[in-house]
Image: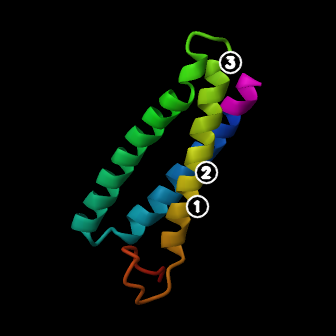
């Protein structure tokens, strides 16, 4: 079960990196916003990892902990992928979307 959870997280992490790169590409001409994206992503990764440490703390030292951590990482990363995908589908002129539409 641990290897399945780890494989699921690995797949979701790849999706996250793919979506992130797409956003970076759209922000190629906007260094300030691209920097904010990087800052936000690093902060989110720190939150995700810390949250998963917290969520799995009841299993500290146990054999189930790696599976619980992987499942947490996967779930939070899936949510982040969905959040980032929203930026790729904003309507032109949306004031709450820092990512320009695709050409």
Label 1 crowd (10 A; few <14 / some 14-19 / many >=20): few
Residue drawn at x 62%, y 44% is: 75
Asked whether residue 68 is drawn in magenta, I would say no
Marks 2,1: beta carbons within 8 A: yes
Marks 3,2: beta carbons within 8 A: no
Element class at badge 2: helix
Total marks placed: 3
Residue drawn at x 40%, y 71% is: 26
In this rendering, is residue 68 above or below 64?
A: below
Residue indicated by mark 3:
64
Q: Position of residue 71 (x, y in %)?
A: 65, 35
Q: Position of residue 102 (x, y in %)?
A: 48, 79
Left or right for 34, reference 57: left
Left or right for 83, reference 29: right
Inspect this view and state whether residue 88 appears. yes
Please provide the residue range marked out in magenta: 1-6
- Alpha carbon separation for disc pair 3 and 1: 28 Å
Residue indicated by mark 2:
78
Q: Position of residue 13 (x, y in %)?
A: 57, 44
Label 3 crowd (10 A; few <14 / some 14-19 / many >=20): some
Residue indicated by mark 1:
82
Residue drawn at x 40%, y 47% is: 44
Which quadrant, please, contains the N terminus? top right
């Amino acid at each position: 079960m641990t290897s399945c959870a780890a494989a699921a997280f690995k797949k979701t992490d790849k999706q996250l990196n793919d979506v992130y790169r797409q956003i970076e590409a759209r922000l190629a001409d906007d260094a300030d916003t691209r920097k904010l994206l990087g800052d936000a992503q690093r902060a989110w990764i720190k939150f995700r990892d810390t949250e998963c440490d917290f969520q799995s703390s009841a299993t500290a030292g146990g054999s189930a902990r790696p599976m619980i951590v992987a499942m947490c990482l996967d779930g939070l990363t899936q949510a982040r992928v969905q959040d980032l995908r929203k930026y790729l589908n904003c309507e032109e002129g949306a004031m709450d979307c820092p990512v320009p539409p695709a050409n």
